Image (cartoon, rainbow, N blue to C red):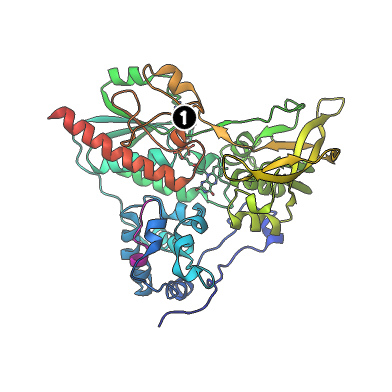
């Protein structure tokens, strides 16, 4: 009998008043009984619109049927046919705009909690399966992956399964890309990412860290070392700034720097002495997931007041609804339709306040969103000692500068064709380096597609 409840089975969470003081995971995940109860809300409908809503076409109704039958291994195998990182995607994918947006149950009530079920299946597998991934036989052909974010990991995994000798080159001292340096522990525990990386290593993939390609060694030099094809998954980690007065004051961070200090350099753990400001009042400029992560991290580090300053309204906030909801529960103050014009410093050049203007929404712009317009004479100041700028990021130009023949577009993103091939023969690319800042699942999908193309390219070369 299907469960005809209009609401998803509630997921246990840490109490907001407790969790805003710690970095432990907010959402605690379903128990077996909760997962089955939620799975029973799926009508297993004929047209299965959820599958086309998923960027990597996970067979969602099938994995949910396996959950109903308590066959969690089969459920896991169904998901991982197309999704390498279910424990990650179950936690951070914007399901409300993808699979769940197409769910028939969403017409009258809440859609099936596909993300929550995916997370349950992945966690069940992590906690209960002790199978080591098999090391495939290698064909001796060397492929280099540049960058160890979700696009690089997905590409490496599929190429290793096809027998290639894969080496990942990562600029940081820890692999994982944004999953490790950007998304905080309270949304994505790092042990989950580590497990995926351990699995790759068990499959024979080599990971070389502290290797900034373009500085330590170039793609051409790697080619001389025998690498036959390349995947560039270097992300979009260079922060954009607003260009307003005061951005170089002490106490102004880009969100990437702030989050890297907290996550990768462990500023949130007392045993680490990573320098980070002990803020009392923080303004985070921007309204995306990155802004929410920075604001919620600042709160957990002890700030009394944390503001999100965003120039459009609540409906236009690009962050996931769940993240906005969690941020509000934790006491983050939303200053919507507000735009900063100046950061004000004291005699020591430290941030003292931020000057903003009020905005209203006008006609739609080229992006289809209503354009924010300044309300005259609405200048006002908010007293803060820290400003975190989170208005987007762009790809780093290093690969373009050091790889002759590789082209980028006007936003600095690598140009690729349908097969994810760049304009340089044998060099493929995907993820944020191609699209600009996007999502984990899209990056992973691009890495998988590029792996297929690299395989076809190398097979054709040896014919
Ligand atoms: C704070 C934050 C929160 C986010 N939240 C979400 C979310 O909730 N849901 C979601 O779907 N997406 C989210 N995203 C976006 C998502 O994480 C990215 O779209 C995704 O990680 C992109 O993957 P990627 O493999 O293209 O690049 P990245 O994950 O950026 O990885 C690129 C890697 O390449 C390395 N690298 C760069 N240059 C070089 C070089 N020259 N040599 C060697 N290595 C290099 C970098 O150090 C990095 O490790 C978030 C992003 C941030 C920053």
The answer to whether residue 390 shows anywhere in this view is yes
Q: Nearer the viewer, residue 319 or 263?
A: 319
Place residue 269 in its image quadrant.
top right
Task: Name the residue beneath numbered marker 1.
Answer: 413
Which quarter of the rendering shows the N terminus? bottom left
Give the x, y percent position of residue 44: 36, 71
412 to 137, vertically: above or below: above
Task: Give the residue at the far left of this rendering.
Answer: 463
Q: Which residues are magenta?
A: 56-63
407 to 392, vertically: above or below: above
Place residue 169 in its image quadrant.
top left
Give the x, y percent position of residue 178: 51, 40
Image point (31%, 56%), residue name: 131
Image point (28%, 17%), residue name: 224
The answer to whether residue 201 shows anywhere in this view is no
Give the x, y percent position of residue 145: 36, 32
Is 79 left, or right, of 163 in this rendering? right
Tag 1: Cα neighbours inside 10 Å, few (<14), some, or many (≥20)? many
Give the x, y percent position of residue 92: 51, 52
User: Is label 1 in a helix, a strand or a loop?
Assistant: loop
Residue 61 forms part of the magenta stretch: yes
Q: Nearer the viewer, residue 393 or 134?
A: 393
Image point (35%, 28%), residue name: 422
How many labels were placed on the picture? Answer: 1
163 to 219, vertically: above or below: below
């Amino acid at each position: 009998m299907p469960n005809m409840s209009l609401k998803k089975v509630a997921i246990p969470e840490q109490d907001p008043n407790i969790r805003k003081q710690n970095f432990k995971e907010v959402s605690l995940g379903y128990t077996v009984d909760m997962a089955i109860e939620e799975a029973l809300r799926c009508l297993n409908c004929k047209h299965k619109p959820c599958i086309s809503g998923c960027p990597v076409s996970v067979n969602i109704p099938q994995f949910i049927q396996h959950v109903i039958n308590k066959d969690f291994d089969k459920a896991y195998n169904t998901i991982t046919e197309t999704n390498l990182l279910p424990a990650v995607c179950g936690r951070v994918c914007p399901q409300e705009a993808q699979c769940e947006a197409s769910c028939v149950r969403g017409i009258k009530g809440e859609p099936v909690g596909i993300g929550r079920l995916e997370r349950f299946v992945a966690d069940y597998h992590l906690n209960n399966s002790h199978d080591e991934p098999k090391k495939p036989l290698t064909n001796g052909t060397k492929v280099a992956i540049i960058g160890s974010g979700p696009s690089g990991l997905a590409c490496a995994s599929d190429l290793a399964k096809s027998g290639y000798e894969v080496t990942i080159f990562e600029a940081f001292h820890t692999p994982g890309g944004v999953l490790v340096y950007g998304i905080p522990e309270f949304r994505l525990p790092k042990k989950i990412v580590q497990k995926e990386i351990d699995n790759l290593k068990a499959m024979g993939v080599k990971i070389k860290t502290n290797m900034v390609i373009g500085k330590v060694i170039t793609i051409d030099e790697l080619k001389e070392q025998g690498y036959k094809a390349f995947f560039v998954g270097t992300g979009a980690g260079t922060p954009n700034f607003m260009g307003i007065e005061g951005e170089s004051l002490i106490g102004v961070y880009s969100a990437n720097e702030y989050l890297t200090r907290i996550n990768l350099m462990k500023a949130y753990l007392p045993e680490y002495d990573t320098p980070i400001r002990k803020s009392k009042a923080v303004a985070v400029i921007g309204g995306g997931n990155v802004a929410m992560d920075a604001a919620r991290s600042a709160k957990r580090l002890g700030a009394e007041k944390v503001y999100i300053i965003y120039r459009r309204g609540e409906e236009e906030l690009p962050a996931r609804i769940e993240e906005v909801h969690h941020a509000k529960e934790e006491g983050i103050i939303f200053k919507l339709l507000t735009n900063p014009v100046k950061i004000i410093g004291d005699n020591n050049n430290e941030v003292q306040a931020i000057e903003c203007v009020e905005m209203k929404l006008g006609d739609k712009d080229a992006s289809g969103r209503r354009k924010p317009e300044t309300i005259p004479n609405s200048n006002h100041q908010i007293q803060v000692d820290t400003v975190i700028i989170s208005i987007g990021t762009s790809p780093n130009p290093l690969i373009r500068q050091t790889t002759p023949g590789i082209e980028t577009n006007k936003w600095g993103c690598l140009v690729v064709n349908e097969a994810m091939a760049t304009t340089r023969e044998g060099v493929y690319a995907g993820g944020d380096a191609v699209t600009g800042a996007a999502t984990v699942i899209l990056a992973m999908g691009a890495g998988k597609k590029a792996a297929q193309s690299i395989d076809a390219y190398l097979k054709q070369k040896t014919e």
